[in-house]
Image (cartoon, helix red, strand yellow):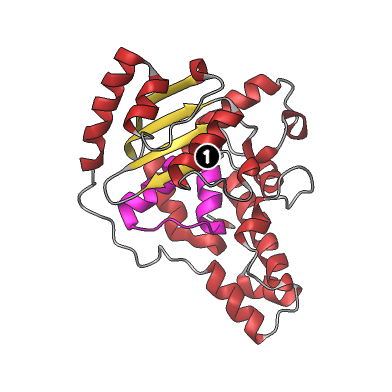
Amino acid sequence: MTLNDISERYGLEDEERRIFAEYTGNRFAEAEEADVQDTGFLAPWYKILDYAGLFGVEKAINDKLLSKRPVDFRSPDTLSIEIYDSFAGKIPVIYARDTQDFEQLVTNIAYKGVRPEGLSTTGASFISGKTTRFILLSAKPYSNVPAAELGLSDEAEWEEKSIILRRGHECTHYFTKQNYGISNNLLHDEIMADFIGMQEAFGFYKAEWFLRFMGIIEGSGGRLSYYTKSLPERVRGAVSELARCASYGLEAWSKREDFLSMTTGERIRAMCFAGLEGMCNL
């Protein structure tokens, strides 16, 4: 299915077609891969890990990251920190399995103590600045979709899988930022990140699950409305259709023999340069 086919199906007019094409355009098509990865931001984190080993994770976070806005953690024993050796390179990760602790961490670190709107639906945060980069992860059900909606029986296991899925998702954004200088909350970025996240957590990708996470299949998920909120209604419908096409195309691709022999980085590169339209028949 092509962008033109979808535009015709949704009756998009000239301006709507332009907006649709702009939103779904492939920003990676002409991107050049960086020769050198920035790892200078890691040095302070080894000291933070050493400090956590001596005094505990709670004190390390409050003393080294939040000295001006410390968090009164409800469940400090569930906190952990690591420098995760991901497919995108090493990246510090803070795990806050208690929802209240996670939300207060995000509020104090990323928003200077002012709780942002919609935080209750947020399960991860990538903190990125000139001299620092790290990931905050929660154990909330991924995309707020309960286990039962995915046909899974164990809610506790789904929470643990959600952590791994989120980590893979955020590391995909980290990969594209490190290698191409590109990372946005757009459908192209999000489908790649969910694809890799599912592969990391389960070893497979299900288009149906992605569509539930996005809210394209009706249920508890609804992330696509956030990524497309600025688009006209008919364009949002067209983007949803393209998401269906791309997600089922990726599922078929993930079962092919050539896919199975690829590294995670090679898979991300293939999705980057295919673009959304190309994902339908990758």
68 relative to 108 in the view: left or right: left
Vertically, is 96 above or below 29?
above
x then y, percent, for residue 142: 62, 36
Quarter occupied by residue 14: bottom right
The answer, for residue 102, to whether it is visible in the render is yes
Q: Nearer the viewer, residue 39 or 246?
A: 39
Q: Secondary structure at mark 1?
A: strand
Dominant secondary structure of the residues highlighted in magenta in the image: helix
The answer, for residue 257, to whether it is visible in the render is no
In magenta stretch: residue 220: no
Reading the image, the residue beneath label 1 is 124
x then y, percent, for residue 13: 70, 84
What's the magenta region?
171-197
Q: Residue at x 73, y 71 (%)?
A: 233
In magenta stretch: residue 180: yes
Quarter occupied by residue 34: bottom left
x then y, percent, for residue 21: 56, 74
